[in-house]
Image (tube, helix red, strand yellow):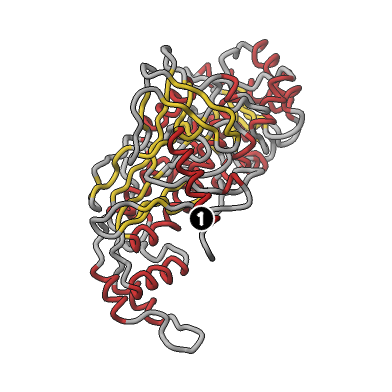
Amino acid sequence: MRIPSELYRPSLALLTDLYQLTMAYGYWKSGVNTKEAVFHLFFRENPFHSGFSIACGLAYVVDLLSTLHFDTEDLAYLAELRGSDGNPLFEQDFLAYLRTMDFSCHVDAIPEGTVVFPREPLVRVQGPIIQCQLLETVLLNLINFQTLIATKAAHVCLAAAGEPVLEFGLRRAQGIDGALAASRAAYIGGCAATSNVLAGKLFGIPVRGTHAHSWVMSFDDELEAFQAYARAMPNNCIFLVDTYNTLEGVRKAVQVGQWLRAQGRELIGIRLDSGDLAQLSIEARRILDEAGFPQAIIIGSGDLDEQAIKELKNRGAKITTWGVGTKLVTAYNQPALGGVYKLGAIRAPGGPWQDKIKLSDEPAKVSTPGILQVRRYYTAHRTFLADVIYSEETKPLGGWTLVDPLHPTARHRLPPDTPYTDLLVPVFRNGKAVYTSPPLHQIRQRAQDQLACLPAEVKRSPDPAPYRVGLEESLYEHERQLISQVRKAPE
């Protein structure tokens, strides 16, 4: 499903950090704006101390880049900005350049719903350096957040072990756009439905919900509240039973369930939102079963996340559906993915590529040079075996050797006949979209299929086994040579 453009005003060109525009101005002023560059967007660590992540947000990228331009209002605002001397920050000729600039980059990306790992480029941008630079902030904004939430949702759903997870986070989400993006990403990550009605309308996500404590409190007693709701919505009866006395609430839900059955309807279930959810669900299950409602579901909610769900399951909770809100949509305990966008190569128009590398005293923050692709290897049974990051400029022949740059003595040889897939696919060519985002349910299914191919020990939480990811051997050696050259170069 295409991201509805009515969510935003027509131009989002100013959805960027000022330093992207000041660098763009510097490129233009220096006459190097026609140089061609390659940038890669990636992250350095899996979030939530987990063994994997789920790529998400590409549909937003496609939609935004398809209409990227600076409109008259954007340029009028930029013309008002002043430097420290009180003069305009940007020349009028530069603003005229932005007015006529047509997006012309190649963009390759890993499709949404794909299991991904640290250091792997999720997006690769190639084109005029000024355009590549202007995309940094917005790409990170769109990819970082949705990848983070899709990953959190995947872990919550794994903890639920096949039982439905409902995303209930709208009221606690970071603003309107944060709520919508979170609902979409949570669905991709595995959630079965959302309480967010606008997300349901815009994205086609199933919506779920019944009533709150305020409904019960607005009547003289709980039974009357349940009866009134059943008369109003006999096809949507899940009763929130913990307003006063939870187990008494379950018994009253049973009474109304018997009335519904007499009308040819059926009690769907109950929801527990507070108290000892494990013990209460066990007692509620007994009451429901003894009353002849073994099919009635028990929904658990209230500050749940993957760890809470695991603990409840370990205690024998009889919850069959999980409502997860705040800790899902806010990515509780890790508020950001930490994705970065780094220059990999540059060249003059028509000239040879010059690979670039960023150094750091922290080995994990050294960037990988070149024009990169990710190759995923499989076992004969399609289980993920290893991911190799390689340079498309020097693609080696025959079997490949994978090198972990943080542990270079750990090398792994992959035979030539090992099946594989290259993960980055064309999304834009010369600024024109060549990729159509699949329907959301297909992206969600891709995530499920990908997780099914991931070794169980990598999905384990806590203490997942590391998945094998590294550089192709010749790329690793090239990186080491560049590091040596840069460090020896005179200041």
Callout 1 environment at 10 Å: few (<14), some (14 to 19), or many (20+)?
Answer: some
For image coordinates 53% across by 20% down, the residue present is: 455
Question: Toward the viewer: 441 or 368?
Answer: 368
User: Residue flagged by tag 1: what amino acid is it?
Assistant: Val
Please tell me in which quadrant of the rendered image residue 439 appears. Answer: top left
Question: Toward the viewer: 363 or 115?
Answer: 363
Question: Toward the viewer: 380 or 326?
Answer: 380
Above or below, 72 relative to 227: below
SS label for mark 1: helix
Tell me: 70 left or right of 14: left
Residue 370 seen by the camera: yes
User: Dividing the image into 4 quarters, which one contains the N terminus?
Assistant: top left
For image coordinates 51% across by 43% down, the residue present is: 480
Tell me: 25 left or right of 226: left
Above or below, 109 relative to 461: below
Residue 301 in picture, x, y percent from top left: 64, 33
User: Dividing the image into 4 quarters, which one contains the C terminus?
Assistant: bottom right
Residue 223 seen by the camera: no
Residue 473 in picture, x, y percent from top left: 46, 33
Residue 274 in picture, x, y percent from top left: 72, 34
Q: Give the farthest residue toward the bottom.
A: 86
Tell me: 422 left or right of 326: left
Above or below, 457 relative to 2: above
Question: Toward the viewer: 386 or 305?
Answer: 386
Residue pointed to by mark 1: 486
